[in-house]
Image: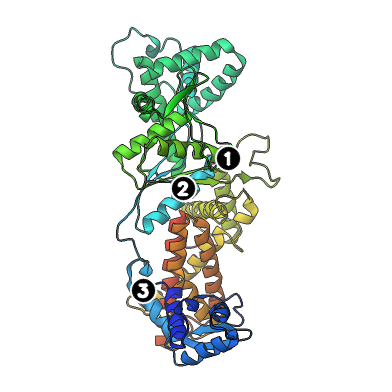
Amino acid sequence: MKKLLDLISEEMEKGFEKAGYAKELGRVTLSNRPDLCEYQCNGAMAGAKQYKKAPIAIAGDVAAVLADSAVFSEVDAVAPGFLNLKVKERFLRDYLQEMQEHEKFGLELPVKSKKVVLDYGGANIAKSLHVGHLRPAIIGESIKRILRYCGQEVIGDVHLGDWGLQMGLVITELKERQPDLVYFDESYTGEYPAEAPFTIGELEEIYPTASKRSKEDADYKAKAMEVTYKMQNGVRGYEALFGHIRRVSIEDLKKNYAGLNVEFDLWKGESDVNGLIPSMVDYMKREGYAHESEGALVVDVKEETDNKEIPPCMVLKSDGAALYNTTDLATIMDRMENIEPDEIIYVTDKRQELYFEQIFRCARKTKLVKPETELVWLGHGTMNGRDGKPFKTRDGGVKRLENLIGETNEEMYRKITENREMPEEEARETARLIGLAAIKYGDLSNQASKDYVFDMEKFSSFEGDTGPYILYTIVRIKSILNKYKEQGGSLDGLKVQDAGSESEKALMMQLGAFQATIEGACAEIAPHKICAYIYDLANAFNKFYHETRILAEENEEKKAGLIALLVLTKDILETCIDMLGFSAPERM
């Protein structure tokens, strides 16, 4: 179904046309003076020069022909030529009733779905998730849900960092500690143990130890590089250990991502495309795309129109080793061959802008992607502490993600149990839901490209522009609906009725903006637009709630209309928070 603002604009366009002016002048926008009107049109101002006529005269002509409009209750021409508009309650009622009847509240879906690969997460195996992994996971998950809701086919890929020297370091340190493990006997031909010779806790301690040691001990680093070479070239024991590292890590990563309500369709990593690199390199050489520069293999990606320096994209280092560039290009090749996406979207730190500019240019120049394939990079800002610097623990370290989530849940549990009695299990689950809303809304309500301050005191507040405030609004509506059912009322078949007050009409107008909001958030890949919408919607509902007798309304037909409005508000709020990646408890 058509968007509310489009229908209102169509009516205004008819008015301009009927009055003898170009209908294109009839574009309507939300009023920037809601104290004066609900919508406004500035077309008369734009048409003054074209028609050599005073704007107020044009506005007066249009207002006159719209006096009996089925859409507008008021069309006022105001000096120097603005058109101030209010819509009829009946028009608004009919629109919301149509939203109630349509799937996805009337959101128009594409005739043909677009296949999208969404690359987000970017975790490294053998390492614990830390707060730096929070933003790509939260933003990427929300984008995936928004695009899917809007009818796109989306495949989410975590794209693990699971290759290169980091794996050699882990295996080298393991060999130092447990040299008698069968994996290090290169003459061994039997089956290797199914169980890993380490836990995730041990693995997460091994890597930083090995990394630190390699920076201080050249011989140790040389050993790690040799192990890396053997692993990448098929030495059985090292391959088996790599398999254990990957399995143990992914199992732990899935548990941690589940704590954020984040799920991936693919758990692929750099290692999955290692076998494709030789053929890709041969192709780039054969077709004349790649050439040697100071011993390295590069592809020139600079263009004549560039006004800044764009270095060549390095495909192989001078020693023949692959880089992140290499595996990212091979991953694009793999995705094009096996998934054939219309679009690939990457969610990473905004400091990687130049890197992705090089990768995208290289992929296009070497024809790894079709000309029509869209390559999109969304760079996000950093999560900072109150000091404005990247978020750290009190001792200056990088906080583990599970610790941040745990601390948030404890804070919400404290707040919940202070204010009311609740069974322990329910209190813990409610705290988890509210804590997740606090973290996710606190992040997503900011434009992705901007840095933001992680302020748990603010994010966990039940007042203001926060996740808990949105959940509190939903729970308030659920409570009213439950009481209505306890009184013998049914929620089936209820229809929204004409607005009986200004606050009720304002709420209805907010609900009517749903399709436009979701379309905009999808087109711009902008979850913050949904946050802004539900905050305005929650405010509109709470104003309406405080000014309206709902359950105490004596007219049963009118009460049923009010309840219908609550049901629609709850359903839209819950749909929106699901797109943001969290949900509401039954009570708070």
Is 366 situated above or below 195? below
Instruction: Report which quarter residue 565 is drawn in.
Output: bottom left
Instruction: Name the residue that disc number 2 marks.
Output: 140
Tag 1, which secondary structure? helix
Between the C-alphas of marks 3 and 2, the distance is: 30 Å
Query: Which residue sits furthest top?
Result: 187
Tag 3, which secondary structure? helix
Image coords of residue 134 (percent x, y): 53, 44
Image coords of residue 175 (percent x, y): 46, 13
**Residue type of the residue flagged with mark 1:** Arg
Residue at 59% across, 78% down: 34
Residue at 37% across, 55% down: 148
Q: Residues within 10 Å of mark 3 (few under 14, many from 20)?
A: many
Instruction: Name the residue that disc number 3 marks.
Output: 100
Looking at this view, is 416 or 99 the one in front?
99
Mark 1 and 3 residues: CB-CB less than 8 Å, in contact? Answer: no
Q: Residues within 10 Å of mark 1 (few under 14, many from 20)?
A: few
Between the C-alphas of marks 1 and 3, the distance is: 44 Å
| Badge 3 or badge 2: first in the primary sequence | 3
**Residue type of the residue flagged with mark 2:** Gly
